[in-house]
Amino acid sequence: MELFSDISQMTSWISSYLLPFLFVLTIVVFFHELGHYLVARWNDVDVSEFSVGFGPELFGFNDRNGTRWKLSAIPLGGYVKFMGDANAASQPDHDQLKNMSNDEKAGSFEHKRVGQRAAVVAAGPIANFILAILIFTATFYINGRYVLDPLVGEVVSEGAAEDAGILPGDMIKKIDGVEIESFSDIPRVVGANPDQPLSFEVDRGGELLVFEITPRTKVREDRFGNVIRTGMIGIVSSRENANLHLKTYNLIEAAQAGAGETWFIISRTMGYLGNIITGREAADQLGGPIRIAKVSGDVATLGITALINLAAVLSVSIGLLNLFPIPMLDGGHLVFYAFEVFRGKPASEKAQEIAFRIGLALVLMLMVFTTWNDVTQPWFLSN
């Protein structure tokens, strides 16, 4: 397949997809590594390198503490390297650790208490979640939110809602205990639960009724040509002007809404992964760097606010990914620290080396799998 037929097409691809992708990913990676860095410095850990990207350094500088801040050539992540680390994955350099002076040990990550090490490692994913909350909070506070009352205007014939007894004029109040504030909240909850029975609390003329509805799986294309498998129940909103209004938020309300939005993404992501494990969902919706670039370019056409909100969504996803209990990832390190607390001493050098090799293999397999998912998508094959 020939991706670029001429220079102008390549230039268009760079401006439309690559630059938005780098913008979004750089924000997310920087804040993730900044979380590690700040907590490390608070615990008097010497940091030798702070890198956005991997591979050869493009440019950088040294700060007064001796940390090399740099931008590297491969923009698919980043790392903070502490004194005593053998590599960017924070694998301990056991030879260096054994030959350290007392002064060097004072600044060594591996010589800190297990609680301090765990705090440094956990700070990266936590920083991702905080970034998402801050972005969503700012969006709600500055722009507010257009709310379309969750009033059913039309029930699709032979759909799941009609079969359950939903009628035009019904006001949907809750779905499985989740408060429904706007009609747009309905597909967010329903879409994440195809073929899963859901409890709907409905206001019908002042009377509160409860229905059990199982969303049916539908495959559709979004406005950008991405194929999405989602749950649908077959209702259409009431689009009378009186039902649409702008809701504004004060700072506290915006922060609460931002935290709620972040939690929704976390719960939806974990629910989808759980469904993959149990066989109720296919894994073809998992995407890698190519899909992130595609989505970044698509969202960039909607404006800078939409692109920054995408950074928040991606930040949550990267935070969750790094918490997976896989050696090389932050979650894998936390598992080692939990084992150290339980055992009373760290795992052996041999065990750590084997675990890191397994972790590397798993991460590479995940990258290959998600990249394969990307290149077999219709939008990619049609280029």
Image: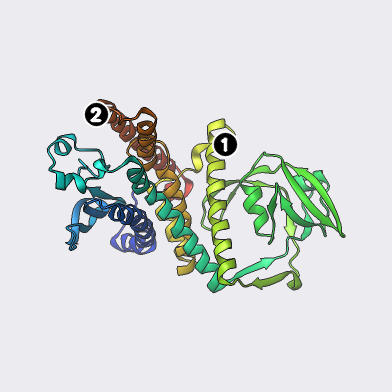
Which mark is drawn over residue 349? Answer: 2
Question: Tag 2: residue type?
Answer: Glu
Q: Position of residue 136 (x, y in %)?
A: 51, 63
Q: Residues within 10 Å of mark 1 (few under 14, many from 20)?
A: some
Q: Quadrant of residue 371?
A: top left
Sequence order check, earlier mark of 2 and 1: 1
Q: Position of residue 376 (x, y in %)?
A: 44, 42
Q: Measured along the vertical axis of the image, is residue 108 above or below residue 179?
A: above
Q: Residues within 10 Å of mark 2 (few under 14, many from 20)?
A: few
Q: Residue at point 77% right, 48% down?
A: 161
Q: Residue at point 73% right, 60% down?
A: 150
Q: Position of residue 142 (x, y in %)?
A: 53, 73
Left or right of 243: which side holds 228? left
Mark 2 lies on a secondary structure that is: helix
Question: Tag 1: residue type?
Answer: Asn
Q: Nearer the viewer, residue 74 or 199?
A: 199
Mark 1 lies on a secondary structure that is: helix
Q: Measured along the vertical axis of the image, is residue 108 above or below residue 358?
A: below
Looking at the picture, the colour scheme in use is rainbow
Q: Position of residue 380 (x, y in %)?
A: 43, 49
Which mark is drawn over residue 295? Answer: none
Q: CA distance from mark 2 to mark 1?
A: 36 Å
Residue bearing the label numbered 1:
275
Q: Residue at point 25% right, 54% down?
A: 51
Q: Nearer the viewer, residue 285 or 258?
A: 258
